[in-house]
Image (cartoon, grey):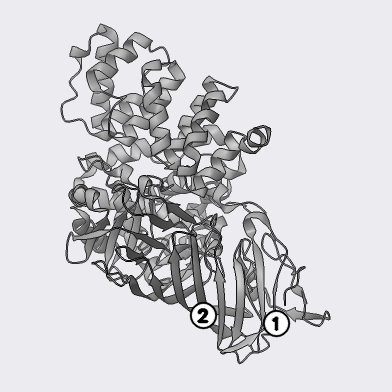
Amino acid sequence: MKRSGLPFIGGVGAMAVTLVLASCSGEEKKTETTDKQKEELVLIHSHAQPAESKVTHLSWDADVDFEKKQLRATATYELENAPDADRFILDVRNLNIETVSVDGEPTDKWWLGEGGDYFGQGLEVEIKPTTKQVSISYSTNPDAQALQWLNPQQTAGKEHPFLFTQSQAILARTWIPIQDSPGIRYTYDAHVSVPSGLMALMSASNPTEIDSTGEYDFKMEQPIPSYLMALAVGELRFQSIGDETGVYAEPSVLEAAAYEFEDMQKMLESAEEIYGAYAWERYDVLVLPPSFPFGGMENPRLTFATPTILAGDKSLTALIAHELAHSWSGNLVTNRTWNDFWLNEGFTVYFERRIMEAVYGKDYTAMLQVLGRQDLMKTLGELGEDSEDTHLKLDLDNRDPDDGMTDIAYEKGNAFLMMLEEAVGREAFDAFLNKHFEENAFKTTNTEEFVQRIKQDLLKNDAERYAELKIDDWIYGPGLPENAVKVESDAFSKVEANMEAWMVNDDLSAMDPTGWTTHHWLHFLRNLPDSITLAQMQQLDRAFGFTETGNSEIAAEWYVLALEQGYAPADDAIDAFLVDVGRRKFLVPIYSAMVEADPTLARARAVYAQARNNYHSVSVHTLDELLKWDEYDAES
């Protein structure tokens, strides 16, 4: 039987010491928690109560039905319970719960709480302190937010369908009942049945060849949080890159992907030299169809990557270094709540650029740092320099944690770590971070614990030095503190000199872009003056082919500029790009520029109507709001 009215625990900013819980009989009981437990229990985006009962291992058996766009599955959880535990709570969102068993025996003593929009519901199962296992059989809905079902025409091969998941931040609950918090880690195994001729992959041990039976088994022996659960199914092939690295892609994409990522093994070895042994056995990359909403997703053992990084010249492989770096920062040591998101991403950007420096040199990395600072300053301008959303430590209570996934966590976090490195020296800072990763391996941490580590381990309890470095301003204050490290790029100085020579002489022959990479062109495009004329836009386009470029980074930058300047020759290419590419990083600025150019939203909505079904729900959620789609859809 089901009941409604389960107390909504997710989204609570601070819990009282006494939690009042409704029992099956309708009577009230009280569970006292210590201050330490209260700290551990603040799961602001989850209904779970891990101090009472938490999952330690998941066994997942699933059938993938492309015709119905549905997963039918049974999830079996091994539990760790408190001495007085009487309930096990999971997060679910739009799942069809069919049967529940406790230690192998069917039970009707489970309840679904009231809906909570993006928070979903709490699924409560009555247990005993001695309960070892709970099993739940269920199915997903065709519009499950984490799942994107692609028809053959949306793939590179055009012959077979494709499925991929995106669980971060709190979308795992839309395809698996789970304690959906980064603060809870578990191991898992899985058996997945797919149509013959397709390959299934997960964030676990993976096959390298298609099994004609369509039956696949997986193991993840290192504990992970729920946002790192991942599944992909399609016509895929594998190519080895090195002893521990390889790439998966659709057959027509595989050769290009293997070429683009041929430095992966070198990146892995360089990362190990900086921050210790890789803990996940293999590091492979799966190139997804273009609707994937992010550049990459750091699913352990199997990074999911956008095809938009296949530039043909390896110029966008910093993304691979970034996702690899997550194997330490994020996957190995995880932010306890989404308020601490910068502990994942700021560390990872810093580490990514250390890897790129080791592989490609300081000059190359300087370009990345300058472009990253440009992104940060743009985000600060959009959010407002006094906005609380520009703090490193966020306050996302009662908000979708996706709201916190901005360049603040990434680039301000990186800038903070760069400042610390400069303050104490690289050798001391590396020793500090190595100790951090080693002592917290396969654990979670939060901002306050890391600040304490800075005080004790890095600054040796020197309060004056702590204040001098403005650490509280960096973490708990807005904007970019004045002691941020300023990085300059000689390569970009030459780009600026070339641009000035062209602008002064009005003659492109004054420019010499020989050897320019994506990064040089991005800096060039970002620094063109607002006074650029349509004639000059046309001159650039004829010389360098920006409108028809196959480089997505350059295209996206050029398309925004074209919309801002009213450069009509790019219109068709812009529309085609928006229909084909689902990466949110590109979509939001292009659609925003469309809105700015036409506040009636007519053009933007017309393109979006064609493209929306090609986008993952992560992108749709953002764009629906930008384009006021619900209002338009209702009128239509």
Judged left or right of residue 561, residue 51 is right
Give the residue at x 22% y 49%.
252
Residue 72 x %, y %: 50, 69
The dot on residue 109 is 1
Q: Nearer the viewer, residue 119 or 432?
A: 119
Q: Is residue 618 above or below residue 569?
A: below
Q: Residue furthest top?
A: 505
Judged left or right of residue 603, residue 10 is right
For disc 2, the marked residue is 76
Q: Is residue 236 visible?
A: yes
- The amino acid type, in three-letter code, at marker 2 is Thr
Give the residue at x 28% y 17%.
540
Residue 40 x %, y %: 60, 71
Q: Secondary structure at mark 2?
A: strand
**Badge 1, how many Cα within 10 Å: few under 14, some, many 20+?**
some
Judged left or right of residue 248, residue 589 is right
Q: Secondary structure at mark 1?
A: loop
Quarter of the picture holding the C terminus: top right
